[in-house]
Amino acid sequence: MKRQLTKMLGISGVIVKSQKQLENTLILEIENNSKTALCPKCQKNSYRLHQNHYFLIKDIPWGEIEVLLRVNRRQFKCDNCSKPEA
Ligand SMILES: [Zn+2]
């Protein structure tokens, strides 16, 4: 089921971690699949997790059901230049 949902979302590199349905609202928790991120400044891979940011976005409703995406937007801290990535 989770794999199907991931496929349906069609966002590359993003996986559906969990799903919760409250009456007519479906909340999908999604997360970027990659464990690392490339630093935009020095183009090095950074491994240190800086922060977890959660935000909700409204997706296209599936019929009667309102779809909300709970996105975990992780920030990584660069060991090289120590600038958190946007
Ligand atoms: Zn860097």
Image: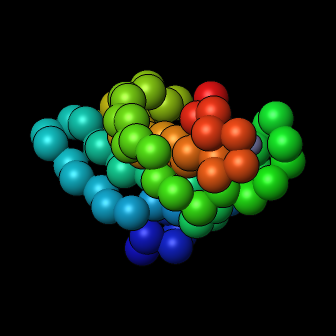
One can see residue 7 in this view: no
Q: Is residue 68 above or below residue 1?
A: above
Q: In the image, residue 75 lies at what x, y percent?
A: 52, 42
The answer to which of 60 and 44 lies nearer the viewer is 44
In this orientation, which residue lies closer to the viewer: 19 or 51? 51
Q: Quadrant of the N terminus?
A: bottom left
| Residue sticking out furthest to the left | 23
Q: Which residue corresponds to the image point at 85% horizontal and 48% vertical from the top-left? A: 43
Residue at 43% across, 26% down: 58
Q: Number of labelled discs?
A: 0
| Color encoding of the figure | rainbow
Rendered image quadrant of residue 27: top left
Quadrant for ligand 1 reads top right
Along the horizontal axis of the image, is 47 left or right of 29? right
When asked about the image quadrant of residue 34, the answer is: bottom right
Image position of 45 (left or right of 17): right
Residue at left offset 46%, top offset 60%: 16
- Which quarter of the rendering shows the C terminus? top right
Query: Looking at the image, can residue 52 be seen?
Result: yes
Q: Nearer the viewer, residue 74 or 55?
A: 74
In this view, the residue in front, 3 or 83, is 83
Taking the spot 37% from the left edge, 29% from the top edge, the residue there is 56
Residue 39: where, in percent of width, then height?
A: 75, 44
Tell me where residue 65 appears, x and y as whole percent: 33, 37
Q: Residue 37, how many percent across, how many down? A: 68, 53
